[in-house]
Image (tube, coloured by chain):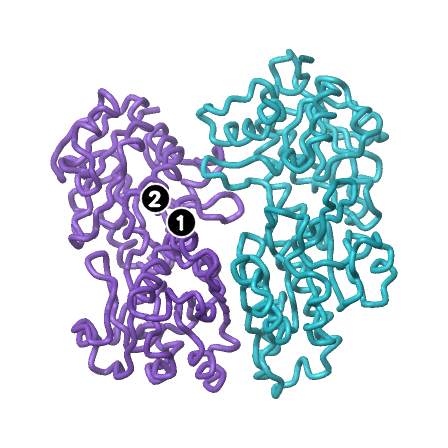
Chain colours: A purple, B cyan
Amino acid sequence: MTVASLGLPRMHKEAGERRDFLPDLVAGVADLGGSVVVERGIGRRIGYTDDDYLRAGPNVVVGSNEDAFEQDVVLVLRAPEERLCLMRPGATLVSMLHFPTRPQRVARLCELGLDAVSLDTLTDDIGHRLVVDGRDVAWNGLEAAFDVLEREWRYFLDPTRPPVRVTVLGAGAIGKDAVEAATKYGNLERAERLAGFPGVEVTTIGRNLTARDGYMKGRFAVTDVLVDATQRHDPSAPVVPNAWLAYLPEHAVVCDLVVDPYLLHEFPPTVRGIEGIPQGNLDRWTFAPDDPAWNTVPEEVDRSHRRWVVSCYSWPGVHPHACMELYGRQLAPLLRELVRVGGAEQLTRCGEFHERALWRASLRAWVGQHAALV
Amino acid sequence: MVPSIGGSTSGRTPVLGLPRMHMEAGDRRDFLPGLIAAADRAGAREIVLEHGYGSGMSVDPGDYLAASPKVRFAVLEEVLASDVVTVIRCPDEPALRSMRPGATLVTMLHYATRPERTRSIADLGLRAISLDGVVDDLGRRLVEYLEAVGWNGVRLAFIEIARLHPRFAHPSRRPLRVTCLGAGAVAAHAVRAATRYGDPELRAELAANEVPGVEVTVADFDLTGHEDYLLRRLEVSDLLIDATQRADTTAPVVPNPLLAALPPDAVILDLSVDPYDFSVDPPRTKGIEGVPHGDLDRYIFPIDHPAWDELDRCVDTRQRRLALSCYAWPGIDPLDCMRVYGRQVESVLSVVLRRPAEDLDVESDDVIERAVARAEIGRWLS
C-alpha cells in the first residue's frame, strides 16, 4: 500500500474568507511518511506563518498553489471549482462538494478523472455527519443578530424590559441549534453579562403554521429576532412574503441562517426563504434597512419592506480559527486513514469505521448509486 | 488490582455474556442478533445469552443462533460468569456480586451520579466501561438515544392531548401551545418532535385537513426563575415539558402550587426524569414538583392515579395535571431502541473484546479506543 502525498491549497474566495486548515492537522498526517505540500501563506490570515506548518513534520514543504493541487490527495474546505484542472487524473479531492445539489460539479470531476470525498457527506454508520460545524451556523448567526439588537434597540440593556422574543422558522438541525443559541443571546459572554435580566423566549414553528397568514402576522408583531432556519420543499416560493416584514417591530432583526441564493432564471427558480432580503458573505453580513445591498436584490423580487438583516453564506467562517480547529479535529482521523490507504481509489466499503465512512462519502460511491444522474 | 480477563492479552479470547434486564416487566429490551454477529466478528470466543433473551421483543432464539455459531443459551448465573458482560441498564447488586473478579462490565453506569455503586463495582474487583461515558474527541456521546427520549415522550403526550381535547383535529381550533423548560440536547429533540405532534404521520394528516399546527416556546433558566413570566407562560400552555438539566436538583423549576396556572386539560411531560431522593439532606426533587416518577411499567399518570399519593409526604402534589414520566423513554419502542444501541455498542465491543480494559489507551491511534478508554472505571476513580 502506498501512502499518498497531501496538498493543502488556500482558498481564494472573498477577502473575508480567512479559513485555512491549521498546523495541528498537518502534524496529524505528516508522520505517515508521505509528503505534505502546503500553499505559501497558508494560515496567514489567522495568525500562522509558513514556519508553523514546516515545524509540523520533516516531510512538510511550502509550495505554490499549483504545487498543492498536484498531490495525490488535495484538501480544501470550499470546492475549488476553477482549480480542478490543476489536479492529476486519479487524484482525490477532499472538500465540501455537495454531490446531491451540484450535478454539474459531479460531472466535471468525473470528466477530469478525479476521485473525491465530500466532507458534507461523511457520516458514521447511523448517518450522523462527521465533519460539520452546524452549531456555529446557528451560534454565529444569532451572535450577529443580537449584536445588532443590542446596538439598535434602546431597551435591550434595560433590566425592566420584557424577555427578548425570538421566532425560529423551522425545527430541523439548524433550527435546533438556533433555539439553544438564541436562549443564550448567541454568545455565552453576553448571556453572563445579562444574567438577572429577563432572558430570551424562543418560539419555534414548523411549516404547519408558517403558511398561515393571520397567525404569522400576529407572531411577527411580537418578534424581536426572526430566524430563518427552514428547509423548504419548494425553494421557488418564499416562506415569508416581503409584505409580512411590515408586521415586525421597527427594531426587529432578521437572522438568515439558510442563505439560499436568488436564482430566478434557473428552472425551477430559487428565491430566498424571507423574500427581499440581501445575501451576505464573509466580507459583509450585516445590512441596515437603508443599506445599498438591498438594491442588489433582483428587481422582480419585492423588497419594499425592510428591517435589519444578518446573512452570511458561510456563517462558520465568521470565527475562522474556532471553525478550523473543529474541522481539523473532526477530519484528522479520516484524513489519516485516507492518506494511509493511498487515496480514495483504495477505499473499500467493508473497512474499519473511518474507511467505511470515507467510502460512503466518495465520488465513486455516489456515482455508483446515482449513475443515471451523472 | 485483579487483572482483567477481558480482551486478548490474557492468552485467550473472551467469552461475552448478555443477561436480560430484570428491573421491571415493561423493559423488554435485549440486544438484537446484529450485535451478536458483530461480537463474533470482533473475536468473542463464545457468546452466552440468558434463557429467554429477545423474547420480550419476539425475537426468535433461532435468529440469535443463526447470527453466530458461538452462541449458546444459559441461566443468568452462567451468563454473569462471562469474561465480558454487556447489558444496557446496570444489573442489581446481587448480579454484580455474581460476576468474576477481573471480568469486564459494559453498561450504563453514570459514574458521576452513582458514586456508591461505582465504588462497589471497583471493590468487587470488576473492570467496567460506562456506556454513557464513551465520548469522542469532541465530547460527544457515542452511545445515546436522546432523540428517542424526545420523540417517544412527545408522541405519547400528544396522544393524551388528543384524548383530552375534543377539537384536537378540527380545522377551526387555535394552534396548540407547548412550553419546553430547558434548551439542551433533550430539549432540542423535544422541540422538533413537538412541532410535529411527535408523529410525522399525524402531522401530515392534520396538515392535509388544514388543522393549525403547534407553537413551541422554549424557556431556559434565566426565564423560568421569573415567577410572573412563568405563570403567564403556564396559563397558555397545552403541554408543559421538563427538559431541564439542573445543577441543583434540590430545588424544583416549577413548584407544585404554580401548576394551578395550567389549563385544567393541560398535560405535563417529564423528560428529565430526575428522581426524588429523600435519603439525602436536602432531598432531591423533580423539576416539576409533584409529578410521579414513571418507568416502563407505568408512565401515564392521570390526576387520580395512585402514584401521586404514593409519593413521600414531603412532596407537594396538590396541584395535578395528567402527567407522563418514564425513567427509560427509549425503551417505549424496544426494537427501535436496540437497533440504535446495538450499532453504537458494536464499536465499543470491537475494542473491549480485543484489549483488556486496563490496557485501553486514551492516546491510541484508534478513535474508538480513545473513546472507550475515557469511560473505563479506573480512569474515573483516579
Q: Where is residue B328 in the image (x, y as percent from the top left)?
A: 71, 49
Question: Is any atom of residue B253 visible in this view?
Answer: yes
Which quadrant of the structure image shows residue A254? bottom left
Asked if residue A14 is positioned above or below residue B14 in the image, the reply reads: below
Where's the N terminus of chain B, which quadrant?
top right
> In the displayed structure, does residue B358 sit left or right of residue B104?
left
The crowd level at tag 1 (other Cα within 10 Å; few <14, some 14-19, many 20+) is many
> Which chain is home to disc 2?
A
Asked if residue B132 is positioned above or below residue A310 in the image, the reply reads: above
Q: Are marks 2 and 1 in contact (CB under 8 Å)?
A: yes
Does mark 1 fall on the same chain as mark 2? Answer: yes
> In the displayed structure, does residue B340 sit left or right of residue B165?
left
Which residue is at a point 63% across and 29% down the rendered structure image?
B129
Asked if residue A340 is positioned above or below residue B337 in the image, the reply reads: above
Q: In 3D space, how far apart are the residues under numbered discs 2 and 1 (Cα atoms)?
A: 8 Å
**Element type where label 1 sits in the image:** helix
Which residue is at a point 68% across and 62% down the rendered structure image?
B269
Which quadrant of the structure image shows residue B302? bottom right
Q: On the image, numbered disc 1 is attached to which residue?
A: A121
Which residue is at a point 77% across and 51% down the rendered structure image?
B295
> In the displayed structure, does residue B279 sit left or right of residue A98?
right
Q: Position of residue B207 (x, y in %)?
A: 57, 78
> Which chain is home to disc 1?
A
**Element type where label 2 sits in the image:** strand
Asked if residue A84 is positioned above or below residue A266 in the image, the reply reads: above
Q: On the image, numbered disc 2 is attached to which residue?
A: A117
Label count reads: 2
Q: Which of B290 and B112 is in front in this view?
A: B290
Q: Where is residue A260 in the image (x, y as percent from the top left)?
A: 32, 66
Q: The residue under label 2 is which amino acid type?
A: Val
Q: The residue under label 1 is which amino acid type?
A: Thr
Q: Nearer the viewer, residue B200 or A109?
A: B200
